[in-house]
Image: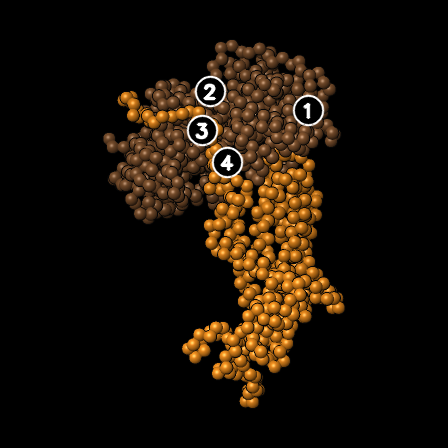
Chain colours: A orange, B brown
Amino acid sequence: MTDRPDRFVDDAPFDPTASALDLERADLDAPGWVLVWRKFRTHKLGLISGLFIAFSYIMLPFWGFVAPYGPNERNEEYLYASPQKIRLFHEGEFIGPFIYPVTAEANLTTFQWEFVPDTDNPAPLRWFCEGTPYKLAGFIPSDTHLFCPAEGTTVFVWGSDRLGRDVFSRILYGAQLSLTVGLIGILVSFSLGIFFGSIAGYFGGGIDWVINRVIEILRSLPELPLWLALSAAVPSNWGPVAVFFIISIILGILDWPGLARSVRAKFLSLREEEYVRAAEMMGAKPGRVIGRHLLPNFASHLIASATLSIPAMILGETALSFLGLGLRAPAVSWGVMLNDAQNLASIEIYPWTALPMVPIIVVVLAFNFLGDGLRDSLDPYQD
Amino acid sequence: MTPLLTVENLEIGFGREQSVVRDVSFEVPRGETLALVGESGSGKTITCRSVLRILPRSAQVRSGRITFNGRDGVVELSKLTERQMRHVRGDAISMIFQEPMRSLSPLHRIGNQVSEVLWIHRGASEREARRDVLREFERVGFADPERVYRSYPFELSGGMRQRAMIAMAMVAKPDLLIADEPTTALDVTTQAQVLGLIKTLQKDTGMSVILVTHDLGVVANMAEHVVVMHRGRVMEKGDARPILSDPTHPYTQQLFAAAPEIPTVDEPAPEVESNDPILTMRDVNKTYRLRASVAWKPDMLARAVRGVDLALERGKTLAIVGESGSGKTTLAKIALGAEKPDPGGEVLFRPSAGGEPVVVNQMTREERTEFQKNAQMVFQDPYSSLSPRMRVQDALTEPLEIHGIGSGSERRDKAAALIEQVGLKSDMLKRFPHAFSGGQRQRLSIARALMLDPVLLVCDEPTSALDVSVQEQILSLLEEIRDRHKLSYLFISHDLAVVARIADEVAVMRAGIVVEQAPAETLFFDPRHPYTKALIAAQPEPDVNRPIDLATVARGAGAPSDWPEAFRFGEDDFPALTTMSPGHKVRQHV
């Protein structure tokens, strides 16, 4: 403290020139995606969901290896077989994973097939065994499975359906179509949405007016009947793959207006930013302004809204297939499987036929959590 | 007498990081004003908010004691429960915020928002509250309290909204008013009036005031005591008069040196000769069409700029000064060809001395490309003028890339050279703009504007978003660059004191019209127009012996229809510019 009686003066050394060249926020000195990642990392639910989704997609080509049966492999002896438990202990003794073989017996009072386990003869599972041939990743022929039942027995982890097909294996195979239909749909919807949204938002005026009216017309159409009409128009003699593509494109075509609107709104606010005006003053052409300045600055928003619309696509496919208008057998998807569970009576007696709902719920929730997490970490420049 | 508020050894921090407020102590005596002075990041706002305990969620008060000796006896504010605290807020201690735009709810009528204070703290009936509120409205200077009571915030101007905020803070007759930069967002004439109002109210009610500000001029006009803060610590504190007349701490001295002042001029400057104008605006008008309030009524016309004739001499600086809404930014856009003037107007640009002029409002595509190389702009907000996703280097080389000038390595060399010229280091090229402070970013955007070697630079309030000391540095940089590159500036500002040091000629605008135009010295030596006089009088200066002359401000700051007879103008007819002396033109009836 100094000797002035009328005031307090700080006596720590003070260097007036010190701060001119310092970085004020060295912590923000990184590309945008690094900052987003740093913030996203702290969002536990989103992070776990993201890992789960990444795992699901990475495994898609390899489900054939994990599934003990092929997607359309029938076991005529075991229609509507109830789920079999994989056990580890037989009569108090550890003997590794095994099942009790079941035999079907007709119950003459209820007129149902009953599956009676033979608890005296445990049948251990075989590992890396030969089974139904399948194609790994769609093109490498293979017949090795992770596990198979012992000779002469079955392993229906989640039961079998009305044709005696293994529900567990079908759910794994179904993931291949159900999860990818969303991606293709999103691709279509994003290309359309970004294209129309950005020209409407950037140029404004007449183009904006026309695009907005088209969006309003598209949004005023009742969605479900339109889906139905469009998919009913798909020729019934087309193969399952062609139908799959058409379905995902239909989902995409109907989904873009919402996205175009949010792109347009974001453009309208971003183009008031001074860096955009600066680029225009420098003589940048519209394509450059959109590509170099506007899109990079809301790419993260786009990714977040993509993650939030994929579940809608998955649900859309499920709904269509459930109604019998989407994918058709022999293609396997979760919606096609649920088509079998339309009958209330059969759900009551064979509840495991409705099991494909579980992966749908889990995947849709995971996508929503991931999208929420991304959205929360989008603006890394805030404090 | 015990002080009203005592803050002892306050320490506040965020998360696990170092404290942003360290060892701050001060006292607020009864009936007097204490000013917390500092730049952005100095911790002054956090300090004053900690009194009311309205800190951001992640902030923690690490130590310290805040004692309030108000109407209910001595209480330690930091120990009260949240429930007891609610009784203090808005009642014994109230607060005015910086943004009058955002501190009133847009959905409720002003009267209801202000009455709410009385309903909550006094349990007043609607009728009593209304009576008190109307009386308060009258005191803060509303001509028609009834109308204000019924209006929504968007119907009022910024100054009026701030008055309503003050009424809201005052209606419960607090012991202590905390004003957090109450006038920073306002025009200088409105600022003078609002400051005057706070002072009058204080005299009437005997309350104490904590005034948070970055402007030493405001301090000199308002405060009895000063606390100067820098990076969370108190640099100097004591009575205002001795500190302002003889600052001791180097930081206070630095603030003083940087504070903009209206210069005292002994004689008028000679006329700026017009031999080689680089930019000429002739009869420029700009009318915007606004959608009428009802669909079936004809559109309304908003006249942003009316009858402007200006010429910018090569190598000189022409400043356009006016409050928000005076049309100065529209004029800048017209000068750069971003907007077209109404038919009949003309903007001529001569890239080289004696060369053929380009008509800016009728350029072909090739002419526009050429023009963009010659005329560039520096923007107001350093935080939004650089794209957050681009490295500094990409932002700087972009103009060259657009115009296809030079190879990649030439562009990078040029960027490196310019970044050194604006006072930064070339190793900053690889960084992202968000790491930089406001002043550094403004330097970057100046460097970007210089990349194309322009001859004309339009500066749109380049310093108004910056702290005073940084503002000083940026102005020096602009001057240096002008002389080195032989640039001409069209300088837009709302602040006469900023313009005073950089401009050769000044045009004062009001309601889209140039009301007075003169060389800078002449204007300060002999201001003629009441509005110019008001602008000069309203400028707060860090000199305790030169208080704001509110009478002069009031004469010139009103609507043009309230000006003295000789200067008055209405919606459509306005007097012509009259030459008073060579180069000095005033819009008045002769």
Distance Cα–Cα, label 1 vs label 4: 39 Å
> The residue under label 3 is which amino acid type?
Ser
Q: Callout 4 environment at 10 Å: few (<14), some (14 to 19), or many (20+)?
A: many
Residue for point 53% across, 58% down: A52
> The residue under label 2 is which amino acid type?
Glu
Location of mark 4 (residue): B435
Location of mark 2 (residue): B261
Q: State the image coordinates of residue B358 (x, y, percent, origin top left).
A: 72, 23
**N-term-proximal mark, 2 vs 4:** 2
| Labels 3 and 1 positioned on one and the same chain | no
Q: State the image coordinates of residue B110 (x, y, percent, origin top left).
A: 46, 41
Q: Secondary structure at mark 1?
A: strand
Residue for point 55% across, 70% down: A127
Instruction: Say if residue B198 shows up in the picture.
Output: no
Location of mark 3 (residue): A19
Instruction: Say if residue B352 shows up in the picture.
Output: yes
| Labels 1 and 4 positioned on one and the same chain | yes
Q: Are marks 3 and 1 in contact (CB under 8 Å)?
A: no
Distance Cα–Cα, label 3 vs label 1: 43 Å
Location of mark 1 (residue): B347
Q: Callout 3 environment at 10 Å: few (<14), some (14 to 19), or many (20+)?
A: few
Tell which tag, 3 or 1, sits nearer the viewer. 3
Question: The numbered mark 2 sits on a residue in which chain?
Answer: B
Asked if residue A19 is positioned above or below residue A178 in the image, the reply reads: above
| Labels 2 and 3 positioned on one and the same chain | no
Q: Secondary structure at mark 2?
A: loop
> The residue under label 4 is which amino acid type?
Ala
Q: Which mark is residue B371?
A: none
In this rendered view, identify the residue nearer to me: B81 or B128.
Answer: B81
